[in-house]
Image (spheres, rainbow, N blue to C red):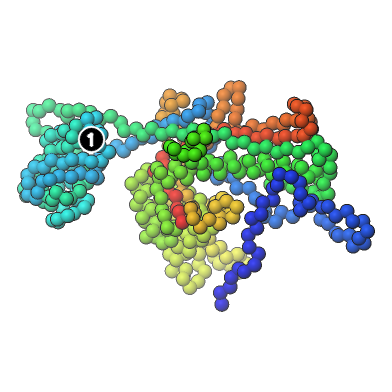
Amino acid sequence: MAGSLVAGGVALQPSAEQVALSTNYITNFDFLNQYLPDTYEKEFERYGNRTLSGFLRMVGAEMPSNSDLIKWAEQGRLHTKYEDCTTGVLADDDTATFTINDTLVPGTGGIAVRVGQTIMLTPKTIVGGTATTNKAIVTAVDTTAGQITVAFYEALGMTNGNAGNVYEMFIYGSEFKKGTNGMQGSLEADDIFLENNPIILKDTYAVSGSDMAQIGWVEVTTENGASGYLWYMKSEHETRLRFDDYLETAMIEAKPAEAASGALGAGFIGSEGVFHAVENRGNVWSGGYPVNLGDWDTVIARLDKQGAIEENVIFNDRDFGFAIDDMLAAQNSYGAGGTSYGLFDNDKEMALNLGFTGFRRGYDFYKSDWKYLNDPTMRGNLTTGKVSGLLVPAGSTSVYDQILGKNAKRPFLHVRYRASQTEDRRYKTWITGSAGGATTSDLDAMEVNFLSERAVCVMGANNFVIFQG
């Protein structure tokens, strides 16, 4: 009989408030009560390690930048293919004029086809006739109209001509007659210029000098190892931990302010985060996640068309991780009716390992649970806008860095923070006021300030895959 979780639930009530509350600290001073409670001196860490950061440290690097704008160039494709070519020529014609509609800018020479090149034409959509291929040689090019005239190599000419058909076309070579001039015209490298801008993140913690004189009754600890009996220390350290998490989650979730948006009208420009970059320049798997080898073959086929990076890491939520484990276990002949997962002796003294760390199918795929996608206070409880995982290529790529003025090796995913010889804004923290050792103003309080200015650069986003839903 299947069971279910019916009690407990997920507590989402914030533990942080702007004032010290009686719900957080002992306030029972009734000394007439003979039944004084036994108290533990140290608070219990009921949620374990609550921090979420660490993803960017695992997959990327941090490096300085001294500008309001970060720009880089990425290589375009080496070969030319067009997917929206139309013609009015009918079947059996020996020559034809095609209009290339892909990213056509008339009058700019925007089509990368030259006289003498040989091309292959394949129907993409068929209105009439049979879907067969043709090969032809380019005899004339009209860059203003975005048109090319071709002569077919087949004796029957255009084998599937119809005015309603749309054709794909790619260049595979060239042919010239004896004693003729060379290729006319040259092609320029198709670089893709991208940019991002840093955003300023801030936080602060303040406590009055009078409250600092109060010693708490419970020993407090935080994930970074801070401990003590002063209650305000916990709040200060949790503010720091929360800010550390926001430094990463802001880089993941940041979105550029769109034209006519309220944020842009208020003077905020936003930034391009990891998810936004992959959704707009990368690959999106929607409607869940791949759960069988056929699904993964679809993902692999897409990666073949991109950079074909040998090693990739999948940062997944728990359900996605289990789905991969179950898929891999099913490949074992004993997977359906036994417990023969992976390679081990299944000794009675050892724990049964029902998980996998990765697999190879065309490429190497390693998987890692991403706490950010599981945490209920972040993306863990979402039903709309759910992200199940992110495939990140391992290694680095070569790009032209406009600050350095030369090609440089950069991780596919890395953070640029604002810095110069006199100002480093990677992670600034300072204390103001007149309490806690600060002597900067007549404010009877201690204020701890945090600031960072940074942006994330997603280079080669076409090699990333985001799994949604």
Can you name the residue that lies furthest to the bottom here?
1
Q: Nearer the viewer, residue 167 or 54?
A: 167
The answer to whether one can see residue 458 in this image is no
Which quarter shows the N terminus?
Answer: bottom right
Q: Number of callouts in the render?
A: 1
**What residue lies at 45% left-to-right and 62% top-to-bottom?**
327
Mark 1 burial class by Cα count in 10 Å: few <14, some 14-19, many 20+? many
The residue type indicated by label 1 comes to Ile
Q: Is residue 300 above or below residue 152?
A: below
Q: Is residue 244 left or right of residue 159?
A: right
Residue at the spot of label 1:
111
Quarter occupied by residue 449: top right
Q: Position of residue 467 (x, y in %)?
A: 45, 53
Which type of secondary structure does the marked residue at label 1 adopt? Answer: loop
Q: Position of residue 133 (x, y in %)?
A: 16, 50
Q: Is residue 298 left or right of residue 336?
A: left
Q: Nearer the viewer, residue 191 or 256?
A: 256
Q: Is residue 444 left or right of residue 464?
A: right
Q: Is residue 431 above or below residue 254?
A: above
Q: Position of residue 54 (x, y in %)?
A: 58, 44
Q: Is residue 24 above or below residue 408?
A: below
